[in-house]
Image: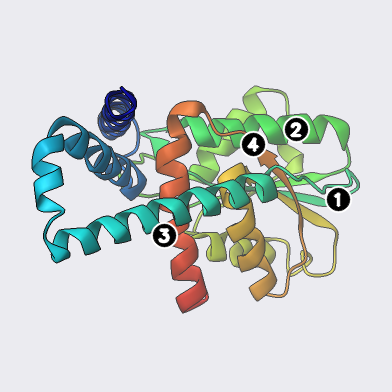
Amino acid sequence: MLKYVLRTAAALFGAALIINGILLIIFANSTIGSYLTVFWGFIFLLPAVFFKKTVKLLMFPFFKLITVFAVFGFACSVITAAFLYLYGTDDNVTYNEDYLIVLGCGLRGETPTEPLRARLDTALGYLEQNRDCKVIVSGGRGSGESITEAEAMRRYLTERGVEASRIITEGKSTSTTENFRFSNKQTENELASSQAAFVTNDFHIYRAYSLARLQGFNFTHIHADTSWYNLAPSYLREILAIGQMIVFKY
């Protein structure tokens, strides 16, 4: 009975991941996180559906080794994701900052993706409480984007009542490291000596803060929530990006 319940749970979980990943690939910006979600879905689904064949394969040392690596990788991913969430939801803004940097996160044509809208909505809430703060919208133009992310963010904020005089547009960056570096140039290097904060999604806070520190910035931060259907792809992609940051320092 327990085996049946576990197999059913694994199959349903795997199927949910596969559907989640495929829908995001089709209807949202296609990222490596979406493909990883599909990959992990098959890792759960196939052994559950072909249970007897899986048991036979586990008689061979090679497949036992693969299973050990898969279980270890999944456990490490869960632990890392939990850390990223706890760190990322621990906001430390003072609402006395001089600048708020909104980090870009992809468009569909000219329309901000859901994660980017969440960042912008969080920024709107912050700017309402800190009326003296200027906001830097930072992001260049990527694949499938008709305009720069910065321009799309500027439009989003002004359409919702933020004065144009409060917005600084940085439209050349293509990475988080460049977001901070180019934003600093747009303020004539004032970010290093001023109080500044950044807003991004919970999964991205730790890496963004770490990359800012590598450049000598000591920013505070505030998070935007991640929608349930973006959780798996966003956190899986972020885990890979953190590995890249540790190895290459960017």
Q: Which labelled disc corresponds to residue 240?
A: 3
State how far apart marks 2 and 3 are (Cα).
Answer: 38 Å
Mark 4 Cα-neighbour bin, 10 Å: few <14, some 14–19, many ≥20:
many
Q: Which element carries disc 3, helix, strand or loop?
A: helix
**By what rule are the colours in the image chosen?**
rainbow
State how far apart marks 3 and 1 are (Cα).
Answer: 31 Å
Rendered image quadrant of residue 145: top left
The tag earlier along the polypeptide, 4 or 3, is 4
The tag earlier along the polypeptide, 1 or 4, is 1
Rendered image quadrant of residue 64: bottom left
Which residue is more in the foreground, 25 or 246? 246
Q: Which element carries disc 4, helix, strand or loop?
A: strand
Which residue is more in the foreground, 13 or 126? 13
Q: Which labelled disc corresponds to residue 97?
A: 1
Q: Which element carries disc 2, helix, strand or loop?
A: loop
- Taking 27 as reference, is 218 above or below it? below
The tag earlier along the polypeptide, 2 or 4, is 2
Which residue is more in the foreground, 30 or 63? 63
Mark 3 Cα-neighbour bin, 10 Å: few <14, some 14–19, many ≥20:
few
Q: Is residue 134 left or right of residue 7?
A: right
Report which residue position mark 2 lands on.
163
Camera-near label (2 vs 1) is: 1
State how far apart marks 2 and 1 are (Cα).
Answer: 17 Å
Report which residue position mark 4 lands on.
224
Q: Is residue 171 left or right of residue 34?
A: right
Q: Residue at x 52, y 28 (%)?
A: 227
- Taking 6 as reference, is 61 above or below it? below
Question: Label 3 sits on what residue type?
Answer: Leu
Q: Determine if residue 103 is in view.
A: no
